[in-house]
Image (spheres, helix red, strand yellow):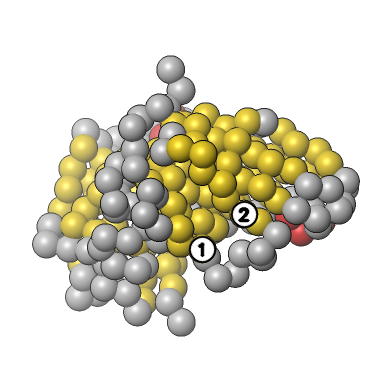
Amino acid sequence: SQKIEQNSEALNIQEGKTATLTCNYTNYSPAYLQWYRQDPGRGPVFLLLIRENEKEKRKERLKVTFDTTLKQSLFHITASQPADSATYLCALDVSGAGSYQLTFGKGTKLSVIP
Amino acid sequence: DTAVSQTPKYLVTQMGNDKSIKCEQNLGHDTMYWYKQDSKKFLKIMFSYNNKELIINETVPNRFSPKSPDKAHLNLHINSLELGDSAVYFCASSQGMTSEKLFFGSGTQLSVL
């Protein structure tokens, strides 16, 4: 069956360190992969999208990599801050590009400890 | 201005009732969605809809039905509510005909007693 797995439910990290979150998928060949942030009581907020022909994408302190051979994306937050504490979700369109079936992983709850 | 707004934010109702959740987006987007987030925080797609096509997740009971009076609105109607329908429901929208970069509403917490 098709799966999207985020490596851990929770990740604790010291302020200032780099947080690395993992998203693995099976049985898909996505045209792109997305990362979202969700704070308690709020809807997910889009962070980054990386396409299958891109190896890496950056936005300020965020970096995403996409390895279509390994079927894996890594999401990095450098110089992490307590304000980065949230749940981070990866998402794939499981029906292929051009459709609208964005499916989310279960998320990793990141806690940045001062 | 809120980009994707849903009402109500909280909805408490009895089993067997019929209820609706409204969603409006002012982004000019072509595609709208409904997602359900259960108690384990797993976000599952229910429907996606644009002016050409409604795609229904096969696991969604037919008690749930989306209604779109126009491109900016996608309301969710739920008939004969059950205890298991208790969850947070999120509306979202995206530009064009792809699911790139979804904008989410703040959610409606539905509690069925």
Say which of B67 and A89 sits in front: B67
**Callout 1, which amino acid?**
Ile
**Quarter containing the N terminus of chain B:** top left
Mark 2 falls on what kind of element?
Answer: strand
Of the two numbered discs 1 and 2 on the same chain, state the one appearing first in sequence.
1
- Dot 1: few (<14), some (14–19), or many (≥20) neighbours within 10 Å? some
Where does residue A111 sit, x and y in percent of width and height?
A: 49, 41
Total of numbered circles in the picture?
2
Residue under the image location 39 percent in, 50 percent down: B50
Which residue shows up at 40% across the image and 58% down it?
Answer: B53
- Picture quadrant where residue A22 is located: bottom left
Do the residues at discs 1 and 2 belong to one chain?
yes
- Residue A102 locus on image (x, y percent): 40, 58
Q: Which residue is mark 1?
A: B56
Front residue of this view, candidates A44 and B25: B25
Q: Is residue B34 left or right of residue A50?
A: right
What crowding class fits label 2: few (fewer than 14 Cα within 10 Å), some (14-19), or many (20 or more)?
A: some
> Is residue B82 or residue B72 the one in the foreground?
B72
Three-letter amino acid code of the residue under disc 2: Ser
> Looking at the rendered structure, which numbered label has been put on residue B65?
2
- Image location (x, y in percent) of residue A52: 17, 63
- Which chain is disc 2 placed on? B
Is residue A75 in sight in this rendering?
A: no
Relative height, residue B16 to residue B70 (above, below): below
